[in-house]
Amino acid sequence: MCVIRRSITIGAPVPKVFGWLTHPEHLLGVWPGLVSVANVTALPGGAHEYDWTRKIGAWKAHGHADAMRVQTDRAVVVHNQAGVPSTWRWTYAGAGDRTELTVELDFTFPLQSVRRVAEAILARIEARDLDALLENVKARLEAPTPGRA
């Protein structure tokens, strides 16, 4: 199993960051390699399930994401199926106009014969993409709102 954990401080209140990130459609503009989000279904408590397509290196992965646990303004746990099954834990903390967003990704490459090499390569790609994702979310949510001073 491989675990990648990253955190970032965003200059926006927790409800804004949480509310924005729990809508899968928003991920298209900030997640490197995310090609499509489709069949989005709203679930109780602000969660969603959806199909996704993502380009990871030279590989195009298709999968389905299910929010397994949602604690409003605190945490979301999402399980991805197909390709390389994974679990993403999104944790939100902060006060006032600051949010500490922590994302933890757990995955295990499914083919035992190449697992060690594949996980090492995939971990580098996912760590790079996760860093970019967090920086993109920060930039998007800290950007001035048009029409406001």
Image (cartoon, rainbow, N blue to C red):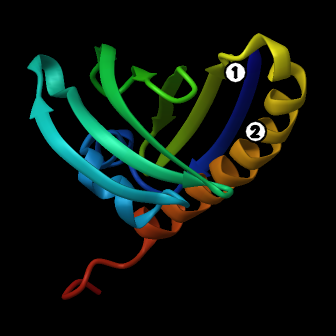
User: Image height check: is 4 above or below 61?
Assistant: above
State the residue in front, 121 or 113. 113
The kind of secondary structure element at disc 1 is: loop
Amino acid under disc 2: Leu
Of pointers 1 and 2, the one earlier in the residue sequence: 1
Residue 82 in percent (x, y) is at 45, 25
How far is mark 1 from mark 2, CA to CA? 9 Å
| In this picture, residue 10 sits left or right of residue 34 | right
Residue 100 in percent (x, y) is at 57, 39
User: Image height check: is 112 above or below 45?
Assistant: above
State the residue in front, 144 or 60. 60
State the residue in front, 109 or 103. 109
| In this picture, residue 25 sits left or right of residue 10 | left
- Tag 1–tag 2 contact (CB < 8 Å): yes
State the quadrant of the C terminus. Answer: bottom left
Q: Residues within 10 Å of mark 2 (few under 14, many from 20)?
A: some
| Picture residue at 75% right of the left edge, 39% below the top | 122
| Picture residue at 19% right of the left edge, 88% below the top | 147
State the quadrant of the N terminus. Answer: top right
Residue tagged by mark 2? 122
State the residue in front, 49 or 139. 49
Residue tagged by mark 1? 109
| Picture residue at 64% right of the left edge, 59% below the top | 132
